Amino acid sequence: MSTPAGPFPSIAAGTERSKFEQLKADSDYLKEPLRTELANGKPNFSEGGVQLLKFHGSYQQDNRENRQKGKDKDWQMMLRLRSPGGRVPAQLFLAMDELADRLGNGTLRATTRQTFQMHGVAKADLKEVIGTIIRSLGSTLAACGDINRNVMAPAAPFEKGAYPAARQLANQIADLLVPVAAEGSYLDLWVDGELSFRIKPQAPVKAVRSRQQEGGVFSGDANEPLYGTTFLPRKFKVAVTAPGDNSVDLLTQDIGLVAFTDASGSLRGCNVYVGGGMGRTHNKEETFARTADPLGYVAAEHVLDLVQAIVALQRDHGDRQQRRHSRMKYLIHERGIAWFKSELKTHYFSHPIKGLRQEPKVKLEDYLGWHRQSSGLWFVGIPLLSGRLAGPFKAGLRRLVETYQLEIRVTPNQDLLLCNIGSAQRSSVREGLAALGVESPEAPAALARHALACPALPLCGLAVTEAERGLPAILERLEAQLQRLEIEKSILVRVTGCPNGCARPYMAELGLVGSGPDLYQVWLGGAPNLTRLAEPYLDRVPLEDLETTLEPLLLSWKAAGGRRSLGDHVVKLGRDAVGALLTPTT
């Protein structure tokens, strides 16, 4: 294959670098200045250290509510796991739980990307925390940063249909896209170079990784053959799912894969979608949320090669000068899916890409309640609003996991699955959950069931208003309004404290996106099965005006007979009619 050429040639090939790109190139595969700054005794990292720290799975934050004029900030680190498909074995969960209590702020949080993150870690304790996670057979490598992030897959441990193949493929992709040289740096920094903890890919991943040294996929750097010394222009997200299951919000990913299997459960191939992404910036029209385009169907034996080929294409063509314009969604939006497919086949991927296979109508699955996992084993899905584990509930969950050695799986809906429950243990686990207040895990409050919120204040430096802490009251108010209006249908609600979209609000039927203190943009029109992008209708709605703002629209929905979802009703009415309903008359 020939060397690629495009509007954003590979930085590794010699294009003038931005300050941040040069930082990555000079870091010795993400080591410096982290190594030096870990030993300097200061409570915080420099700006350069902070940027590289992300690749190691951690963000530097400060508690904004503890800021005092003239005094140092309350510096602390947030870190998150690399856990493909949301799988967290008992040993790893127990280690995270203990670390959160001893060296964190006492809480854990299930994220919308199917992993746990913990907050409140002092810089001086960071090596002990990450080292303990690694020695407990976990990892935080590439949970953040300009690199492939945690690979998503349906959390349910079903041993039927395409679910086992989807989980296996997610694990393979996670191993395939591990940075080679940077993994060495990671182990050097956090476990003093104990290489026994390296991620060890099996066939066919090993064979496909060997092809990173070939053709357009090769970065030009033998030590880091796929990523090169400057890695990717920005974060990169991949999800795999089974046909009909949209628990992973497939169309919001850089790469979305739908796995098709034969009667024996073996992978036959995947429908492939590319170019989704949620992040945007207020008042910057060149930034926007976008759903992925269909690329085509690829046979099983070529799926892994295709994934690394797409990563290489984005490596070479993604914008490295403007970070807010660097995601693959902008590349595809501006150049078109036809160009993208042609460039891919010309320079990076030589195998057939066929037309999409027909898929069943998709559903937002959540797996709450009790389900048969396999012969003699069960799992139970537990609702966890905003994913926060704290206090007595966290302590009680630990007792259950420790007593029965239960595997935990985190869902993209911020809920938890307790897995590998033997038939003889069901009643004891059920009683344990009831003691924690979870008597009917299959039936949470309707609005809360699929509601999401990002952490926002006080720790996120980007938040301009509340999300997680405000969500319970928002849902309570909306539920009271629906009851008063005698509307029995539910609404898919998502809330974020800023426009970056960590809770994927732009796919919601009702998305509230922070635009100022107690002010929110209102997005409407997403689909309950997460297949349609919402649209912005109002920019700065005071939270106290939420009910009066929405009431004319809700009454219109009720008058239509309630057959459609609210999102479908918004689309049916059209933008002008909905806008008129949302504009108060004076």
Image (tube, helix red, strand yellow):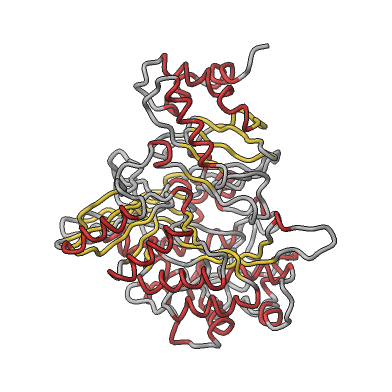
Whole-percent x and y of residue 542?
Answer: 65, 31
Residue nearest the observer in this picture, 281 or 341: 281
Instruction: Pick whichever, 263 or 437, lies toward us.
Output: 437
Residue drawn 66% across the image and 82% down it:
35
264 sits left or right of 435 in the view: left
Image height check: is 295 above or below 285? below
Above or below residue 60? Residue 293 is above
Between 381 and 197, the residue placed more toward the observer is: 381
**Residue that protrudes farthest toward the right in the picture:** 70
Indicate the position of residue 377 as horizontal and vertical percent values.
19, 62
Q: Is residue 189 left or right of residue 292?
A: right
Q: Work out whether residue 355 can be spotted.
A: no
The mark total stands at 0
Q: Residue furthest top?
A: 586
The answer to which image quadrant residue 532 occupies is top left
Closer-to-camera residue (279/14): 279
Identify the residue at horizontal 45%, vertical 48% (top origin): 385
Residue 61 visible at all: yes
Where is 324 relative to 72, above or below? above
Please identify the quarter of the rendering in which residue 461 is found: bottom right
Quadrant location of the C terminus in the rendered image: top right
Task: Point out residue 244 in the picture as x, y percentages from the top left corner.
Answer: 30, 44
Which residue is rendered at x = 24% and y = 57% of the image?
158
